[in-house]
Image (cartoon, helix red, strand yellow):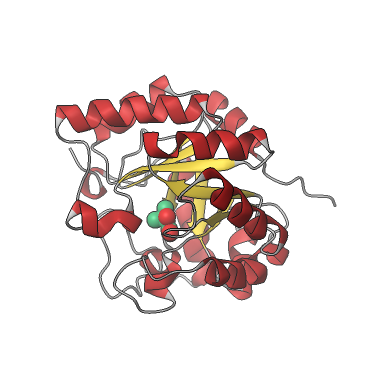
Amino acid sequence: MTISRVTVKTLRKMKQAGDKIVSLTAYDASFARVIDEQGVDVILVGDSLGMVMQGHDSTVPVTVDAIIYHAKAVAPQCKRAMVMADLPFMSYTNPNQAISNAARLMQEGQAHIVKLEGGEAQLDTVRHMTRHGVPVCAHLGLTPQTVHKLGGYRVQGREEAVAKQMLSDALALQDAGADAVVLECVPVDLAEKLSKELEIPTIGIGAGRVCDGQVLVLQDMIGISSLAPRFTANFLRDGRNIPDAIKAYVDAVRDQTFPTDEQCFF
Ligand code: KIV
C-alpha cells in the first residue's frame, strides 16, 4: 500500500476542511517510527533537543550540525509525516546564510520544511527561501531562541501593541511565502484572531484549541521532562504504553479535547 506524504498543500487543505493538524517532536529513529505510525502529520526535529536531549537550559547552544544529526535519524522513518527541522539560533541572520543552512537541513537532514523564529526581521529571509523552493514555517509569540532578550519563558501578546505587531507580522510572513506558523504561548483570543485572518495554518503550543493544529515536545507529553510547562499534558498515563499515549494525543487534538482551558492562557 502506498502512503501519501503530508505536504504543505495537505496542511492548507486540512485548515480549509477544519481538520486539526497534529505535530510532535522527535529526535531519534525509534520514536520517529512510532510517531509516524500513530498518524502524526508533522514531525518536528526541534531545537528543543538542546534541552531534552542535550540537557541545556535553553535552545541557544544548538547548532545546525546537531539538528542535521537528529534529522538524519528521524527522516528515513517517516513514511507519511512531513519532517520539519528547526533553523537554530544565529543560523539565519541574513537571507544567504539562512538559505544555505536550510539547504543543509533539506539535503543532509532530509527535512521537508524548515522553521525559523521571528516576525518582520525575517521577511526578506522568508521571501528569499520560499522563492527558491524552500518551504518555511514561521514561529511567533514566545520564541525560545530569544529567551534572554524576552527575559524568560512567558506568555506573549497580552499587551495591545504586542498583539497588533504579532498580527501584522503573521500577515506579512504569509505574504512573504510562509506555509504555516507556530504560535507559542499566546492568549487564546489573539490565537483565534490570527487563525481566522490567516490563510496558512496556525499550529499552537500553549495557544488554545482555536489554532489549526497543535504541537508538543515529545518528552513533555510522555511526562519525563524535568520541568513540564503548564500548556502540556502527560498522555502516558492510565496504563498506556508509548504508542497508545501518542495515539491518545493524536485523537485528543483531532477531536479537540486537547488542549483544555487548563492548558491555555487568557
Ligand atoms: O523546538 C521545538 O520543539 C519547538 C516547539 C516548541 C514548537 O519549536
Residue 217: x, y in percent? 41, 61
**Residue closest to the far bottom:** 55
Picture quarter with the C terminus: top left
Q: Is residue 179 visible?
A: no
Ligand 1 picture quarter: bottom left
User: Which of 99/74 is in front?
Assistant: 99
Taking the spot 51% from the left edge, 49% from the top edge, the residue there is 115
User: Which of 125/76 is in front?
Assistant: 125
Residue 180: x, y in percent? 51, 37
Above or below, 210 relative to 78: above
Above or below, 40 relative to 127: below
**Residue closest to the far right:** 1
**Residue closest to the far top:** 197
Taking the spot 65% from the left edge, 60% from the top edge, the residue there is 104
Residue 245: x, y in percent? 47, 64
Taking the spot 21% from the left edge, 52% from the top edge, the residue there is 150
Left/right placement of residue 37 relative to residue 27 reads right
Task: State the image quarter where residue 55 is shown.
Answer: bottom left
Residue 47: x, y in percent? 45, 63
Taking the spot 34% from the left edge, 76% from the top edge, the residue there is 56
Q: Is residue 194 visible?
A: yes
Above or below, 231 relative to 12: below
User: Which of 11/249 is in front?
Assistant: 11
Left/right placement of residue 109 relative to residue 232 reads right
Above or below, 7 relative to 147: above
Left/right placement of residue 155 relative to residue 98 reads left
